[in-house]
Image (cartoon, grey):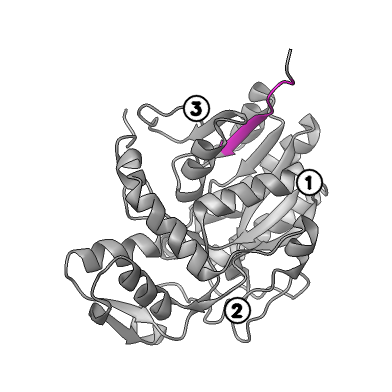
Amino acid sequence: MGERRKRLLVTGASGLLGISLCLDAVGDFEVIGVVNSRRLAGAPFSQVQADFTQTGSAAKLIEEVRPDWVVHCAALADLDACEKNSALSARLNANLPGEVAEACYRSGARLVYISTDAVFDGERGGYREDDQPNPQSVYARDKWLGEQAVWQANPQAIVARVNFYGWSLLGQRSLAEKFYYTLAAGKGMMGFTDVYFCPLVNQHLGRILLEMLEKGLEGLYHVFSAECQSKYAFGVALAKRFGLDAGLIRPVSVQEAGLAARRSPNLTMRVEKLEAALGHAMPGQEEELEAFHRLYLEGYPQRLRAMVAVA
């Protein structure tokens, strides 16, 4: 008999990272995706429903499922929604991660908690893992509190600060999709010239997270592309790769956008710690855009749309 496949529990399984991680891991793991109220149609992995707004729900779930590994993606990730509903943000982004971490510690499951580059104020960029966070929004503050709750409950956990894009169930979850669908419709949109980031494609991010678990890593890691660019430059590159009109993207300052939550401008990140731990370089922006484009050519967005949540 072969070795038992590891049981992988992914919270937020219908989200941008969760869905791609579940789909990618199906061949190698016994995958269980956690959804909130609506199940995915025809998903090739097991699904369980949980209401994480309820205290104790995560612990009960982990006790029942007994996973080997947990990737905790579930969050309230809309920055402006967090500003408008700080109580919900506190519950899902600040309190829930500690409950997940404690339950994993008790059960012996390995945990990756998904955090964010937004914990930094973005005043200087080039951030390493040992730089001091200075969150500027409700979302960022609560995610940082979530990091601290995870450490307190489970010192063996991985905290992965990330930024990523990709194709999602409804086509509305990532900046790349917004650029693609807006420009494909011949409409104009803003591109921030003074906001810098280092995103990975969600498929690549998911594989790297599993590689980190496989290697037995612990602690805080910056999990980003080795290259960074402005969101305007990102949009222009995407437009050119898809044969769309980059002239429809209006270069503007983030100050002109009228957003409810403050965005940290310079979120360039250093990834040397992760590269040393994994023994290989992190991908650059051109490689990531190629992966995003290849998924489009392979019909991945349509595959996701066919799974749109059912009652």
Left-right relation of 35 to 55: left
Mark 2 secondary-structure assignment: loop
Badge 2 local density, few (<14 within 10 Å), some, or many (20+)? Answer: many
Q: Residue at x 58, y 54 (%)?
A: 205
**Badge 1 vs badge 2, beta-carbon distance below 8 Å:** no
Badge 1 local density, few (<14 within 10 Å), some, or many (20+)? Answer: few
Instruction: Give the residue number, with chain letter if any, for mark 3.
Output: 45
Instruction: Give the residue number, with chain letter if any, for mark 2.
Output: 121
Residue 98 appears in the rendering: no
Looking at the picture, which amino acid does disc 1 mark? Lys
Looking at the picture, which amino acid does disc 2 mark? Asp
Camera-nearest residue between 297 and 116: 297
Q: Quadrant of the C terminus?
A: top left
Where residue 154 sits: x, y (%)?
79, 46
Camera-nearest residue between 145 and 175: 175
Among the 4 quarters of the image, the one containing residue 28: top right
Q: Residue at x 74, y 69 (%)?
A: 272
CA gap between label 1 and label 2 equals 31 Å
Identify whether 132 is placed above or below 295: below
Magenta segment includes 290: no
Q: Earlier in the sequence, mark 1 or mark 2?
A: 2
Q: Residue at x 45, y 72 (%)?
A: 261
Magenta stretch in the rendered image: 3-10
Instruction: Give the residue number, with chain letter if any, for mark 1.
Output: 215
Identify whether 271 is placed above or below 108: below
Q: Residue at x 45, y 27 (%)?
A: 44
Please identify the residue farthest to the right as the structure is shown.
155
Residue 241 appears in the rendering: yes
Badge 3 local density, few (<14 within 10 Å), some, or many (20+)? Answer: some
Where residue 1 sits: x, y (%)?
74, 12
CA gap between label 3 and label 1 equals 24 Å
Looking at the picture, which amino acid does disc 3 mark? Phe
